[in-house]
Image: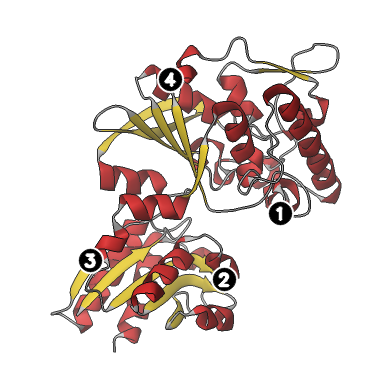
Amino acid sequence: MKIIIATDSFKGSLTSTEAGTAAIEAIRTKVPDCQTELIPIADGGEGMLSVMLNVIGGTTHSLEAHNPCMERTTTSYGISSDGRTAFIEMASISGLPLIRENQRNPWETSTYGTGELIVDALEKGCTHIILGIGGSATNDAGTGMLQALGFRFLDADGNVLGHGGKILEQIASIDDSQKHPLLAKARFTVACDVQNPFDGPEGAAHVFARQKGADNAMIAALDKGMRHFASIIDIHTGKDIRRIPGSGAAGGMGGGMMAFLQAELKSGADLLLDISRFEERMTGADLIITGEGRIDRQSLMGKVPGKILKMGLSRGIPVIAIAGCVKDKALLLEAGFKGVYATKPVHMPLEEAMKREVAIQNIKNTLIAIFH
């Protein structure tokens, strides 16, 4: 019997590798002669860097950059073994977990630090930047990142604007005359797991800004700013990005990178599955186990479990899912999962369940129960 274990990270608790290793250890206690294969996967958010370095190889580079509140903090990114490709997680420097709850305010938070990582990678000789944009604390449409790269955003009086989502509606013109010269030789691939447009009811502000600290009034103001900035982008670049799927990812970072850096947006899950040769490695499998920290109907919309389910169904291989928290179970089973299992015991507090060792034991207990 061959079982493939390919989960996303359990956000805030375990990496993809840690979760998968726990599952394998449990399976082997119940089915010792079973052939297991661990394939770490990510969808462009937390965990992408470790998966990329694990699959492709390379080194980690540490540096100081600005977090979403423009505070200096130590972070890191990866560079491939040949020195040409950088792997950057936006969440590692512009992510929501990096700031306190009372600092969450997409009117003010900036992607400037992500741009600083890109600059560092370019100056180290990288010509291909793979950027995972999940988990951001921002809704500035990538303006902060672009500012770090030398772009200037000006108001109607020609004044240089500052940072955050608050500047979007004030932008009257864009000065790219001082943009970093190495951008001319660089290629950008953006890994994301959402298909939201730039603005509107399904856009960046309305769908994601609340979890980043916005109230109803701020969401409306941010969406208005996104619409205005999209019109300025169209004037400056000739590109209408508003309805492009994924342009609203990471508070509009997807759209900003498409417009100004000619970035190619890819499903983070698809990118990692391709790099990991997942389809090839499925051959001969009798079962696939996937999962993530929380699984619900959104997991079927471009996230790792949904992608793996689709690939398993195409080959007639049963797929089961494990997750710390399970919602919409009936819908997930209807979609084709053979089983969907919550690893967190019902009465266990979430704070306790998210502790690393507890999360590992919960996964083991779940798998032991499945293979009893």
Of tags 3 and 4, which is closer to the observer?
A: 4
Classify the position of the C terminus by image quarter.
Answer: bottom left
Q: What crowding class fits label 3: few (fewer than 14 Cα within 10 Å), some (14-19), or many (20 or more)?
A: some
Of tags 4 and 2, which is closer to the observer?
A: 4
Disc 3 marks a residue whose amino acid type is: Glu
Q: What residue sits right under mark 3 in the picture?
A: 37
- Where does the image place residue 47, in percent across and percent down from the top left? 41, 50
Asked which secondary structure carries label 1, the reply is: helix
What residue lies at 58% left-to-right and 80% top-to-bottom? 331
| Mark positioned earlier in the residue sequence (2 or 1) | 1
- Where does the image place residue 17, in percent across and percent down from the top left? 31, 57
Compute the Cα span from label 3 to label 4. 38 Å
Residue 167 position (above or below residue 353): above
Q: In this view, which residue lies farthest toward the front?
A: 238
* Left or right: 194, with 280 as reference point: right
Disc 4 marks a residue whose amino acid type is: Lys
Q: What residue sits right under mark 1 in the picture?
A: 207
Q: What crowding class fits label 2: few (fewer than 14 Cα within 10 Å), some (14-19), or many (20 or more)?
A: some
Q: Nearer the viewer, residue 113 or 157?
A: 157
Q: What crowding class fits label 4: few (fewer than 14 Cα within 10 Å), some (14-19), or many (20 or more)?
A: few
Disc 1 marks a residue whose amino acid type is: Val
